[in-house]
Image: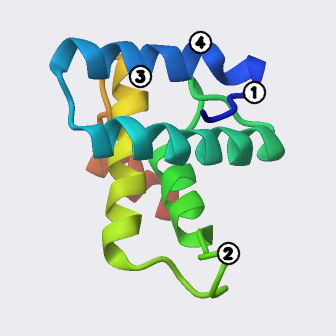
Amino acid sequence: MTFTEPRFRPLIGLLKDHFREERYSDGTVWNYPVAVRRFLRALERRGLTVETVTAADVDRHLDSLRLRRYRGPFPDHSRRMHRAAIQMLLRLVRGKWPPDVVPIARSSTIMMRG
């Protein structure tokens, strides 16, 4: 049995409910909550919330992941799994992920230079 900190239980519960409804594989049901808890702890350390996190914050977290046993960077497949787990949580909480990129009008860019 895995331990979930009480403050993360609502978010992990949301994720697990989604897994049950959509009949996800056992591997996903086991691995995704582990990756999400790690992400939530990292957000908490940085003073961020799921509601305010940006795509850059997610990338920064993924770049910071290291294998504890070998102290090296995560293999690509582990990084992809963590990204997928985080994105699933963010879609469930925020309704859409990644967020839309707001284009900067060319005229405002020109005005800033001049």
Q: Position of residue 9 (x, y in %)?
A: 64, 17
Mark 1 to mark 3 CA distance (whole Å): 15 Å
- Identify the residue position indicated by label 3 in the image: 15
Identify the residue at image location x=44%, y=52%: 111
Mark 1 to mark 2 CA distance (whole Å): 21 Å
Q: Residues within 10 Å of mark 3 (few under 14, many from 20)?
A: many
Q: Amino acid at mark 2?
A: Arg
Instruction: Please indicate whether residue 92 sits to the left or right of residue 55 in the image.
Output: left
| Of residues 112 and 8, the one drawn nearer to the viewer in this rendering | 8
Q: Residues within 10 Å of mark 2 (few under 14, many from 20)?
A: few
Whichever of labels 4 and 1 marks the residue nearer the N terminus, that label is 1
Q: Position of residue 63 (x, y in %)?
A: 54, 71
Instruction: Please indicate whether residue 8 sits to the left or right of residue 35 in the image.
Output: right
- Identify the residue position indicated by label 2 in the image: 68
Whether residue 79 appears in this view of the structure is yes
Identify the residue at image location x=28%, y=51%: 106
Instruction: Please indicate whether residue 46 sits to the left or right of residue 84 in the image.
Output: right
Instruction: Please indicate whether residue 81 sits to the left or right of residue 25 in the image.
Output: right
